[in-house]
Image (cartoon, rainbow, N blue to C red):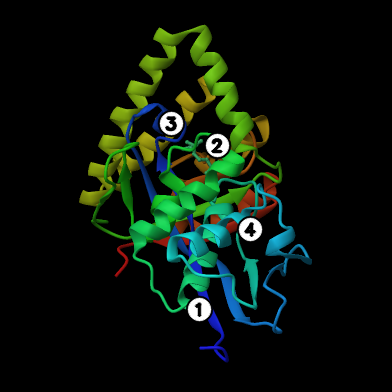
Amino acid sequence: MEDMTITHSAPGKIILCGEHSVVYGRPAIAVPVSDLRAYAEVRPGSPGTGLILRSQDLRQEIALKNAPQEHTLGKASRLVLQHLNTPEPDAILTIRSELPIASGMGSGAAVAAASIRALSNYLGHELPADVVNALTYEVEKIHHGNPSGIDNTVIAWEKPVYFIREHLPQVFNIGAPFHILIANSGVASSTKEAVTEVRRRLSLAPDYYNTVFNCIGNMANAARAAVESGDVATLGTLLNENHQLLRTMGVSLPELDRLIEAARNNGARGAKLTGSGQGGNIIALVDAEQLEIVEDALWAAGAAHVWHTVVRNYE
Ligand code: PMV
């Protein structure tokens, strides 16, 4: 084992419908973005060094023994060692990610899931997806406080999921592949702050926001049915309606609304913010023949980056 280098990866994700209300027990649906990934590699280190944690993107390095409790890679590594009841190896764990950070694509969960898989494999164990999921959830708690669990679930399983907090996730079928453009607003988004803002509003007007959450939950159910039957027209309408309710929850921004308008005005079937909002990304549902036009419009409306992904079934 000692001369082995192990590499694993995990995908990004987008929430199609139901962010924020999912924190309060309503259903949400999310799909993996398999062409944007986080990678983790573990290889042998020098004897006596213990586990060294490296971030290639941030050019940072720290020994596990010096990593504070809130160090996410440190937490992921300690969870694996505890779970396997194994002593710390003399090894180097290196991560890198293609996913934009602080933008609602699950970069933190993807790095954690890839690291958990790579380190456990290096130690001779292949952890099942539900264990990777549970350990990734523990890492997510560092930054998110009280995450619903949707990010780690869709990323650990790498399947489209219908998710209700504290219920077993349901994998669902994509009736017909569809195109999504993801555009980054260039504004960093903090999940914790956005979730805190929604909680503040809920405490001020519980009846109103519970009604909003119920509506979004119904939309997530309808969106799942639309995805399963390949009904992009209905899905587009639901994305638009979901965004309208996210706006009333105070998690949109002019930068996001501008991108959404640009997508809709140029032929997208629907568009909404995705993830916690207050920055980060929007998604637009676009027919194949409109992709170029909508992409150009997103750049012209100030997108910091645009990605194209095809949502389909995953083996
Ligand atoms: O981490 P993000 O930005 O993808 O947001 C996750 C989705 C929320 O519903 C806002 C929070 C949660 O825990 O589900």
Q: Nearer the viewer, residue 199 or 256?
A: 199
Q: Amino acid at mark 1?
A: Tyr
Verify CB contact (< 8 Å) between mark 3 and mark 1: no
Q: Nearer the viewer, mark 4 or mark 2?
A: 4
In the picture, the quarter occupied by the C terminus is bottom left
Could you give the CA–CA distance between mark 3 and mark 1, rounded to whole angstroms?
Answer: 34 Å
Tell me the residue that label 1 is attached to: 122
Horizontal side of 159 relative to 253 (left or right) equals left
Instruction: Give coordinates of residue 85: x percent, y percent.
Output: 46, 65
Q: Amino acid at mark 4?
A: Gly
Mark 4, other Cα within 10 Å: few <14 / some 14–19 / many ≥20: many
Q: Which mark is residue 74?
A: 4
Q: Which mark is residue 276?
A: 2
Could you give the CA–CA distance between mark 3 and mark 4, rounded to whole angstroms?
Answer: 26 Å
Q: Is mark 3 within 8 Å of ligand 1?
A: yes
Could you give the CA–CA distance between mark 3 and mark 2, rounded to whole angstroms?
Answer: 11 Å
Q: Secondary structure at mark 1?
A: helix
Q: Secondary structure at mark 2?
A: loop
Q: Which mark is residue 23?
A: 3
Q: Amino acid at mark 2?
A: Ser
Horizontal side of 129 relative to 122 (left or right) equals left
Q: Amino acid at mark 3?
A: Val
Could you give the CA–CA distance between mark 1 and mark 2, rounded to whole angstroms?
Answer: 34 Å
Instruction: Give coordinates of residue 3: x percent, y percent.
Output: 57, 92
The residue under the point 47% across, 69% down is 117
